Amino acid sequence: VVGTPTDPNATVVVTPAAALPGITVVLVTAEDGTTELTYTVEFTVAPPTLYELPFAEDFTGVATGAIPTDWTRTHSHWGVVATNNAGGTSPEMRFYWSPTTTATFRLTTPFIDATNFDGDLYMSFRHRLDWYSNTFNISAQITTDAGATWDVLWNVNATADIPAQLLEFDLNDYKGEIIQIAFVYVGNSYDVNYWNFDDLYIGEAPVKSVSYTHLRAHETVLDLVCRLLLEKKKKQMND
């Protein structure tokens, strides 16, 4: 806030808000040095947009070099590219080495509302690392306080390529919270060619597939389980 008096002989003193939300105080003193008027300017912070679960992002429709709406990045090294190196489908997110900088490079999701979630909270994403030289750290992190503190869910001190793979996480400790996920590269960006990731999903844990190899005609999965247990017991008795 800047105050400019209409009377050139008056003085204006602005005391800015110490933080946001907060109040800035503007004190105007007249030419006589005695008459004063005090004005206050109140600043508020708009609440963040909350995304509901399940939350899924495959970067479809995001312009090359950009990031999705309501995501944030500390550096321009993060951006969408039309490749599928992480094992999903094009496009995908990429951390790129240029311009060469040594820093903590963070790409952060929007605020995701898990306050009323009562299932098994699960997260997964695909990624691939194309290493170039030396050692640097890559990680996935989570916060429940808008980034004031971060918990590390997974991290690697990279010294070689990492092939395309799917990573899965149990987030049940974070149910009841508003969360954000960050993908973080720490080190000299020159030491990597690129780090790609895709198909971020946060929500109900998927049901693991069941093998139906021994399922007989007209037999349900429950029938199959009971039959296999009985066959196992019978075999143990015969042994």
Image (spheres, rainbow, N blue to C red):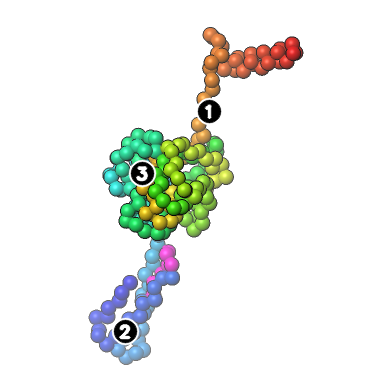
Measured as percent of width and height from the top left, residue 177 is found at 52, 48
Give the x, y percent position of residue 5. 27, 80
Q: Is residue 57 left or right of residue 149?
A: left
- Circle number at residue 208: 1
Span shown in magenta? 19-25
- In the rendered image, the residue lying farthest to the top is 217
Give the residue displayed 54% in from the left and 36% down from the top: 119
Q: Nearer the viewer, mark 3 or mark 1?
A: 3
Q: CA distance from mark 3 to mark 1?
A: 27 Å
In the rendered structure, find residue 11 and report the number of the disc placed on it. 2
Above/below status of 35 relative to 159: below
Q: Nearer the viewer, residue 108 or 183?
A: 183
Mark with earlier residue (3, 1): 3
Across and down, in percent, residue 232 comes to 68, 16
Q: Residue at x 51, y 34 (%)?
A: 205
**Helix, strand or loop for disc 3:** strand
Q: Earlier in the sequence, mark 2 or mark 3?
A: 2
* Neighbour tally class for label 2: few under 14, some 14-19, many 20 plus, Cα within 10 Å: some
Quarter the C terminus occupies: top right
Q: Which mark is residue 93?
A: 3
Marks 2 and 1 sit apart, C-alpha to C-alpha, by: 72 Å
Q: 112 or 15: nearer the eye? A: 112
